[in-house]
Image: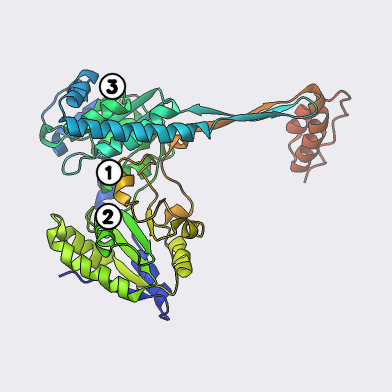
Amino acid sequence: MIQIRHLDSTAADFNERLHTLLAFESATDDAIEHAVTTILADVKSRGDAAVIEYTNRFDRVSVTAMAQLEIGQAELQAALDGLPEAQRAALHTAADRIRVFHTRQKQELNGFSYTEADGTVLGQRVNALDRVGIYVPGGKAAYPSSVLMNAIPAHVAGVKEIIMVVPTPDGVKNQMVLAAAAIAGVTRVITIGGAQAVGALAYGTETIQAVDKIVGPGNAYVAAAKRRVFGTVGIDMIAGPSEILVLCDGSTDPDWVAMDLFSQAEHDELAQAILLCPDADYIARVEASIHKLLPTMPRSETITTSMSDRGALIKVRSMEEACEIASDIAAEHLEISAVEPRQWADQIRHAGAMFLGRFSSESLGDYCCGPNHVLPTSRTARFSSPLGVYDFQKRSSMIEVSAAGAQTLGKVAAELAYGEGLQAHARSAELRLDSVPLQRSPLRTP
């Protein structure tokens, strides 16, 4: 029997109870940290040999060379060609929409330059990363949609080499995952996973070149490994459990809202599903729908645990207050299921992705709308963004100072440099002045 907590924003202890509900301890336990540290050090030291050893152990395969773990382009294409027509068409449609969205995103991220009156040219150049690694879960969880969402933005950004790693326990390959790699423009696919795969991507081995950035979801070992290699390479984020927050004015079919809550609760027991609504009668109707529909769900046990432990139905004073609370929660997925959703969206400051109107179910965004489904969790939407083309690019400042500009800027720079006690900085600027002043005394320092 599912027991969902009810909160009321008028209660004196509401804020305390809400933040207790939202709290999630993302730190891994000592055993995981120790195992990951050992694996990463081993991969860094022994390269391919260590990767093969751990892959044989954890994925229950028996290989002797890295070549046996790589899937060629011909096999990827064969996987795509071998799918049922409906699955193949769905992958192509989703990929096309994701590519269109991220291509438009790239157009907004082009560099810029401007010329000042004295001829100095300043600007910014945008270049793609050379090589990225994409981690794709395998085994019980196989997500072709994650292949599309991670690889297509990298491809659109102009990344030259996209290396995908995916574990294949017992040697079982998911054909839709391979087909998605074929569609998304993945360069290499290597059937390794876990912390050893992260280590291989970060440090490089005899057969895998080190990448510039690692993206993609994984289990606690993968998350711990990504955290440890950050700095050697870039990473996208450390993802927490999935979240959905539904902000509803009471106008949507309660069955729809209940199922939307289920859509995230079914991910795992730590997922979070919350409803904010000013209508107490409507909240009761949603709760009734939850009890009615739950027995029809194949993953009902997971949903029950998730919603009992971390879910909530919250009564608020008004939609305006709901928007304020929603911004504080900063959920990964925010559905605004209301008659005038844009009115309320304008009042939201923080959310990973917003789904506006009763027809915009979060599940559509997971698969085929176009915007990326890799989103910040655990309130990190307050300061971070969805995965996008910008994650696979970096910017370089461009500075071309004219002779005339050097006369003005040189004096300013020299004055500041002397103030900081950096004589060579000052003289470097002064040597370019038409009238070079005598070197100042070193005593003129702070």
Q: Which residue is mark 1?
A: 218
**Residue under numbered circle 2:** 264
CA neighbours of label 3 inside 10 A, class few (<14), some (14 to 19), many (20+): few
User: Which percent across, then down, holds residue 405?
Assistant: 79, 28
Q: Position of residue 22 (x, y in %)?
A: 36, 64
Total count of labels: 3
Q: Label 3 to label 2, Cα distance in Å?
A: 38 Å
Name the foreground residue: 428 vs 147. Answer: 147
Labelled pair 1, 3 in contact (Cβ < 8 Å): no
Amino acid marked by disc 1: Gly
Q: Residue at x 40, y 80 (%)?
A: 11
**Going by the picture, which residue comes out furthest to the bottom?**
12
Numbered circle sitting on residue 163: none
Closer to the eye: label 1 or 2:
2
Residue 42 appears in the rendering: no
Front in this rendered view, residue 13 or 276: 276
Query: Can you tell which mark lies on residue 207?
Result: 3
- The amino acid pointed to by label 3 is Thr
26 or 139, which is in the foreground?
139
Residue placed most toward the observer, 427 or 166: 166
Label 1 neighbourhood size at 10 Å, few (<14), some (14-19), many (20+)? many
Return the disc, 1 or 2, that comes first in the chain's sequence.
1
Mark 1 to mark 2 CA distance (whole Å): 17 Å
Q: CA distance from mark 1 to mark 3?
A: 23 Å
